[in-house]
Image (tube, grey):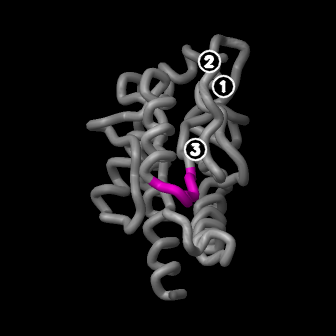
C-alpha cells in the first residue's frame, strides 16, 4: 500500500472520529472547498465540493466547480457562514504543494488552512480542521508554475478519494447515532 492509499484510510477514520466526538455533535458540519477551476492545480477544492454535492452528503458544502470559493469571495463566504450557522464545524479543503513522495496524498489537520500560502497571497485562515491534497511538489521554480503544471489526473484522483473518504465517514457517523 502506497502513502496515498494509507493517507485515505487514515483520512476516512479521522473524519469519522471527528464527526462522532461529543465536542462537535451539536455543530453544523460545513465543508469549505477552496480553489479555482481556472487552474488545474488549484481546482482540487471545487472538484471535491462538486463530488460531495453529487454524493448528497448530509453536510453543507461551499465551493464547487459552478460556484468556486477563491481569493475574491472567500471573506464574503466566511461572513455568510458565520451569519447562517451559529455553531459550526468548518472543515476546509484546499490543494497544496509538498514533498515529491507525498504527491497524491491527503492530510487532515486540526486548525485552519492558510489558503494561497504557496502563492504568497494574504487570505484569511479558515476552518476548525483542514484537508490538504498534495497536487504537486515544491521546487525552486515559482509555485505558480507548479500549480499550472499539475496533472489533472492527480487532481481528479485526489478529489475522488477525498470525496469518498468524506462520504464513508458520513455513513459511519449515521451508523454511530
| Residue at point 56%, 16% (across, down) | 144
Residue 1 placement: quadrant? bottom right
| Mark 2, secondary structure of its residue | loop
Residues drawn in magenta: 85-91
According to the picture, the residue beneath numbered tag 3 turns out to be 133
Above or below 55: residue 85: above
| Residue at point 54%, 39% (across, down) | 94
According to the picture, the residue beneath numbered tag 2 turns out to be 121
- Spatial CA distance of label 1 from label 2 is 6 Å
Q: Is residue 76 magenta?
A: no
- Give the x, y percent position of residue 93: 54, 45
Q: Is 65 left or right of 131, judged from the image as shown?
A: left
Residue 64 makes an appearance in the image: yes
Q: Nearer the viewer, mark 2 or mark 3?
A: 2
Residue 151 makes an appearance in the image: no
Q: Which mark is residue 177?
A: none
| Mark 1, secondary structure of its residue | helix
- Spatial CA distance of label 1 from label 3 is 14 Å
Could you tell me if the residues under marks 1 and 2 are in contact, i.e. CB atoms within 8 Å?
Answer: yes
In primary-sequence order, the first of circles 2 and 3 is 2
Q: Is 160 left or right of 82, judged from the image as shown?
A: left
In primary-sequence order, the first of circles 1 and 3 is 1
- Give the x, y percent position of residue 96: 61, 35
- Spatial CA distance of label 2 from label 3 is 18 Å
According to the picture, the residue beneath numbered tag 1 turns out to be 117
- Give the x, y percent position of residue 50: 33, 48
Mark 3, other Cα within 10 Å: few <14 / some 14–19 / many ≥20 = many
Residue 164 placement: quadrant? bottom left
Mark 2, other Cα within 10 Å: few <14 / some 14–19 / many ≥20 = few
Amino acid at each position: 500500500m502506497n502513502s496515498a492509499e494509507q493517507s485515505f484510510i487514515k483520512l476516512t477514520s479521522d473524519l469519522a472520529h471527528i464527526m462522532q466526538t461529543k465536542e462537535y455533535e451539536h455543530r453544523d458540519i460545513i465543508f469549505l472547498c477552496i480553489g479555482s477551476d481556472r487552474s488545474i492545480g488549484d481546482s482540487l477544492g471545487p472538484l471535491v465540493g462538486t463530488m460531495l454535492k453529487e454524493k448528497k452528503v448530509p453536510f453543507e458544502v461551499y465551493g464547487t466547480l459552478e460556484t468556486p470559493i477563491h481569493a475574491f469571495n472567500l471573506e464574503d463566504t466566511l461572513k455568510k457562514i458565520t451569519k447562517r450557522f451559529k455553531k459550526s464545524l468548518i472543515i476546509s479543503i484546499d490543494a497544496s504543494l509538498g514533498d515529491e513522495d507525498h504527491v497524491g496524498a491527503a492530510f487532515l489537520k486540526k486548525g485552519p488552512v492558510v489558503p494561497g500560502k504557496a502563492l504568497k497571497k494574504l487570505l484569511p485562515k479558515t476552518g476548525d480542521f483542514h484537508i490538504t491534497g498534495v497536487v504537486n511538489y515544491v521546487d525552486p521554480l515559482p509555485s505558480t508554475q507548479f500549480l499550472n503544471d499539475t496533472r489533472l489526473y492527480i487532481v481528479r484522483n485526489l478529489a475522488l478519494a477525498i470525496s469518498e473518504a468524506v462520504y464513508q465517514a458520513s455513513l459511519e457517523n449515521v451508523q454511530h447515532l
